[in-house]
Image (cartoon, grey):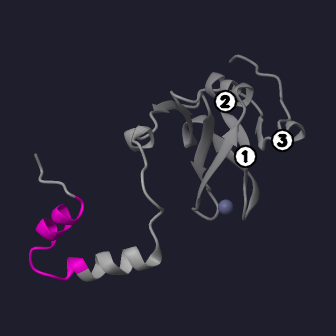
């Protein structure tokens, strides 16, 4: 078994301590410190921003926990055997956003529109989209 030196990540603003290759201590907001095995966590890294998080389901309360982490912490978690998943920002973020923000009135109007027959055609007409 490869020995990984104990690292106290709390002092650096993180909240996961790597105890050895198989046991990781992380913090649940409700329960405090919990011990996890590497396969109980997941490291997620965004391809576009290089920002990453680790996440797990708390073994005590069952709530999902996700925390942002520095590349160093994520690297330590991966080296301890935590599986990694990469993700892409949604393409909608790259779309141009024109016009004022949606208001509560807009949402209510949309709700009323959805209750009418032919709502889709009316919606397409209102935004000038002919579907072509
Ligand atoms: Zn918990």
Q: Earlier in the sequence, mark 3 or mark 1?
A: 3
Q: Does the residue labelled 3 lie within 8 Å of ligand 1?
A: no
Examine the structure image and report whether residue 7 is included in the region drawn in magenta.
no
Q: SS of the residue at dot 1?
A: strand
Magenta segment, which residues? Answer: 113-127
Rendering quadrant holding ligand 1? bottom right
Q: Mark 3 points at which residue?
A: 13
Q: SS of the residue at dot 2?
A: helix
Which mark is drawn over residue 26?
A: 1
Q: SS of the residue at dot 3?
A: loop
Locate residue 64 relative to residue 93 in the image: left or right.
Answer: right
Specify the principal SS of the magenta part: helix
Residue 16: image quadrant is top right
Q: In this view, does 69 lie above or below 78?
A: below
Q: Could you tell me residue 129's position as x and y percent? A: 18, 54
Residue that sits furthest to the right in the current view: 11
Locate residue 20 relative to residue 5 in the image: left or right.
Answer: left
Give the CA distance from mark 3 to mark 1. Answer: 12 Å
């Amino acid at each position: 078994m490869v020995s990984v030196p104990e690292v106290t990540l709390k002092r650096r603003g993180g909240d996961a301590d790597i105890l050895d290759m198989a046991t990781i201590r992380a913090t649940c907001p409700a329960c405090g410190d919990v011990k996890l095995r590497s396969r109980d966590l997941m490291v997620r890294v965004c391809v576009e921003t290089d920002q990453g998080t680790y996440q797990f389901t708390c073994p005590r309360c069952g709530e999902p926990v996700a925390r942002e982490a520095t590349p160093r912490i994520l690297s330590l978690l991966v080296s301890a055997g935590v599986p990694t998943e990469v993700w892409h920002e949604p393409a909608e973020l790259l779309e141009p956003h024109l016009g004022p923000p949606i208001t509560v009135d807009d949402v209510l109007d949309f709700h009323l529109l959805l209750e009418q027959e032919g709502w889709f055609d009316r919606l397409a007409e209102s935004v000038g989209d002919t579907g072509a």
